[in-house]
Amino acid sequence: MLHLNEVRVSIQPLERFRKVVGGDHVTETMKIAQRLRDRFTKRVIWNINSTAVGGGVAEMLKPLVGYTRGVGIDCRWLVISGTPDFFHVTKRLHHALHGRPGDGTPLDERAREIYETTLRENAFELASVVREGDVVLLHDPQTAGLAPALKGTGARVVWRCHIGVDHRNEHAIEGWRFLEPYLEDVERFIFSRQTYVPTICDHGKSVIITPSIDAFSSKNQELSEDAIRTILVHTGLVEGPPPENADHGFLRDDGSPGRVSRRADVVRLGRPPAWDTPLVVQVSRWDPLKDMLGVMHGFSQLFDRDCPVQPELVLAGPNVTAVADDPEGAQVFEEVVTAWRALPHALRNRVHLASLPVTDVEENAAIVNALQRHAAIVVQKSLEEGFGLTVTEAMWKGRPVVASAVGGIQDQIEDGVNGVLLKDPTDLETFAELLCDLLCNPEHSDQLGAAAKERVRERFLGIDHLLNYADLLQKIDAD
Ligand code: UDP
């Protein structure tokens, strides 16, 4: 029996945004939030997705649900469950909407049957808790097929698609053809970029909402240098000893103190990098579109070109057993390990493959936070990318970022102003050249990092994201 799991989220106060975006903006937002709360008495806003941990959707839902609850609206988060076959089909769909063939398995009637069977069971449970007037926000292809079952409940159904491709091709068309029958019962659609809106949703009912990060979460909060070092030494990502009597904690999302207790599982040849070794870091799920393999090969080319600064590379992702809706993780991780084994000894010594513990999501976030803050350069050399929260996270931490000019990354980085764009993500030679330029020019790197932080402050902090949702909810009520 499959079932829905509720993720409990602690309330977050909108007030805290005063520290980062100024008082007037927060006061205005609170007025809008109060009006919305008055209209949402006895109504629930449900968010439905397919994993509580790992990936950008889970990352964003936590603060969005937390701040909405914080203004007194009953906002909830449910996670569907599914069979391995179901997640195989939905991963295939994920690739298709990114314009890629994935593993090439057909999106045929058999795939549809698998998809519908799992969702039918989840829908049965969902329909029993949803009431008339509620708003149900379905996230990504994994949950789109729940829409028809919600029709009879009287709830208003919105589907948010976090992925997409700028130039539609046969794979994307195949993916949309699969999803089309379920989207007829959706009232409004949300996409991250205008170019992602498919023809079948291009009928005035689609809005663009840009993703965001939470500046105060354990993923993005300020950490002292001692705390960063202690966390990285403890997890085995940097060589010890840790600083004496250091503050080694972080604040949990409910404000209570947290401590990183678990270690990372790291594939490496010898010792962890020394504290003062410059690190090139990519943090991602182990997904072929994140191209961890390409990052490793591009990094190798730094040494072919005799870059005067000799960094080390950390590729970090969640422990592959952990992300429920990502069945490819283990295979991609194995491919990276196999390629790492084939590297020349001296290079292998400089590359660290880290599986981060995910048992405690906030502990995992604190490790990612420390790693991103310690990086000399953060890279995101994705082949396709819906938005790329890891880019925003690193920019907020004032790090210089080198990232592919694909998808939503292009909305974040202005090339040469607040980061560096790699025009062709498969061009490893240029990738190595860009890394070397930044490593040899720390002043320029610092300038890019400082400008990156301001870019995020202006455009990608959660408060405007919440306002966009408020606007959408008003429109839905007016329909
Ligand atoms: N992430 C994490 N732990 C990991 C790997 C990734 O918390 O071990 C987070 C990362 O910090 C980011 C999210 O997962 O917040 C990934 O979002 P992004 O938009 O970059 O890519 P997606 O996974 O949604 O394709």
Image (tube, rainbow, N blue to C red):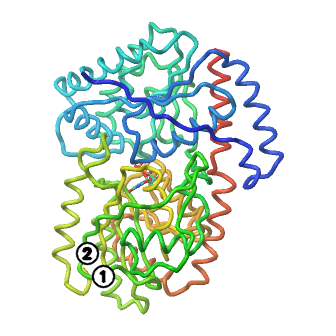
Residue under circle 1?
271
Tell me the quadrant of the picture where the C terminus can be found.
Answer: top right
Q: CA distance from mark 1 to mark 2?
A: 8 Å
Query: Can you tell which mark lies on residue 28?
Result: none
Image check: 182 left or right of 328? right
Label 1 or label 2, whichever lies nearer to me, is 1
Question: Mark 1: which secondary structure?
Answer: loop
Q: Residue at x 41, y 45 (%)?
A: 165
Is disc 2 surrounded by few (<14), some (14 to 19) or many (20+) residues within 10 Å? Answer: some
Residue that protrudes farthest toward the right in the picture: 24
To which quarter of the image does residue 68 belong?
top right
In the rendered image, residue 470, in percent from the top left (x then y), is placed at 67, 30
In the rendered image, residue 231, in percent from the top left (x then y), is placed at 46, 68
In the rendered image, residue 275, in percent from the top left (x then y), is placed at 45, 82
Q: Residue at x 25, y 75 (%)?
A: 268
Residue under circle 2?
268
Tell me whether circle 1 and circle 2 mark residues in contact (CB < 8 Å): yes
Image check: 432 left or right of 392? left
Q: Is residue 134 above or below residue 232?
A: above
Question: Would you say the beta carbon of the disc 1 residue lies within 8 angstroms of ligand 1?
Answer: no
Q: Is residue 14 above or below residue 395?
A: above
Identify residue type, mark 2.
Arg
Residue placed most toward the observer, 417 or 85: 85
Identify residue type, mark 1.
Arg
Q: Residue at x 43, y 84 (%)?
A: 277
Tell me the quadrant of the picture where the N terminus can be found.
Answer: top left
Residue that protrudes farthest toward the front in the picture: 245
Q: Is residue 309 above or below residue 387?
A: below
Q: Residue at x 47, y 56 (%)?
A: 365
Is disc 1 surrounded by few (<14), some (14 to 19) or many (20+) residues within 10 Å? Answer: few
In the rendered image, residue 226, in percent from the top left (x then y), is placed at 55, 75
